[in-house]
Amino acid sequence: MSSLSAISEELGEIEGQISDIFRALSNGFQKLEKIKDSSRQSRQLEELTDKMRECKRLIKEFDREVKKLEGRNDPNTNKTMNEKKQSLIKELNSYVALKKQYATNLENKRIDLFEGPGEGVGEDNVLLASAMTNDQLIDQGNRMMDETDQAIDRGKKIIHETIGIGQETAEALKAQTEQMSRIVNELDSINFSIKKASKLVKEIGRQVATDKCIMALLFMIVLGVIAIIIVKIVNPHNKDIRDIPGLAPPAQSRRLLWFHN
């Protein structure tokens, strides 16, 4: 049983709840060291922040209970309770500082990735817990938690902007892919048309060549027929040249008969 439980059962119960939170924070930060993804780190820091807020609320309850019991306890007991309270505050501040360090590293990583290197983030001067009053310790812890929350909010904003940029990039790539696909289809159609036109031109060329040959042959036949006709007319008694079918032979010369009286 805790020594505080002998003084006050409520103090002992609050101390037990705070100890459970401290164990959860210790395990949470150990798990955070193994996480490499920035989004998962941000979510883990949010969970740890919620636990630290709950711990801060319990420490305030612990402080109120200590102040209520100060008038009924002896100085040694009051000293023990105050020392325990300062120990709890000191331990919470150590987790707050650790969380702030992780949040700052996460924010700097986001800035380097999307905005380039920026101005250095100055570290706050942290006073030793033994040299600070209870109110100073609480104020210091509250201030550090507020700064850490702001850093996490900035990290969330950057993450949302990153997601938006990624979606826009994916849409642009999809549109470009579709455009490239249409261009490829059009090129295939043009290539098919060119091949078809080439084949048609070759066929026309072959027909033209054939027609020219036929025309030349007909022309030669006509010339031959004309030559034969001319020869027949000039030398009708030439037996070496046969008569052309369908063409009448040349008329024979007639002799006039003269009768002498």
Image: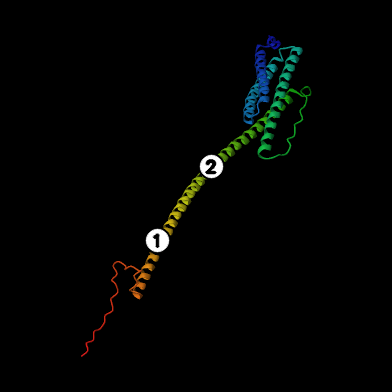
| Alpha carbon separation for disc pair 2 and 1 | 56 Å
The extreme left residue here reads 261
Pointer 1 residue: 214
Task: Give the residue displayed 40% in from the left and 63% down from the top.
Answer: 217
Q: Quadrant of residue 214?
A: bottom left
Where is 144 relative to 183, above or below? Answer: above
Residue 141 visible somewhere in the drawing: no
Q: Amino acid at mark 1?
A: Ile
Of residues 72 and 163, the one nearer the viewer is 163
- Residue 164 appears at what percent x and percent y? 58, 38
Residue neighbourhood size for the residue with mark 1, other residues' Cα within 10 Å, grouped as few (<14), some (14–19), many (≥20) = few
Q: Quadrant of residue 87?
A: top right
Where is 52 relative to 157, above or below? Answer: above
Tell me the quarter of the image containing the N terminus: top right
Of residues 102 and 87, the one nearer the viewer is 102
Pointer 2 residue: 177
Counting every numbered tag in the picture gives 2
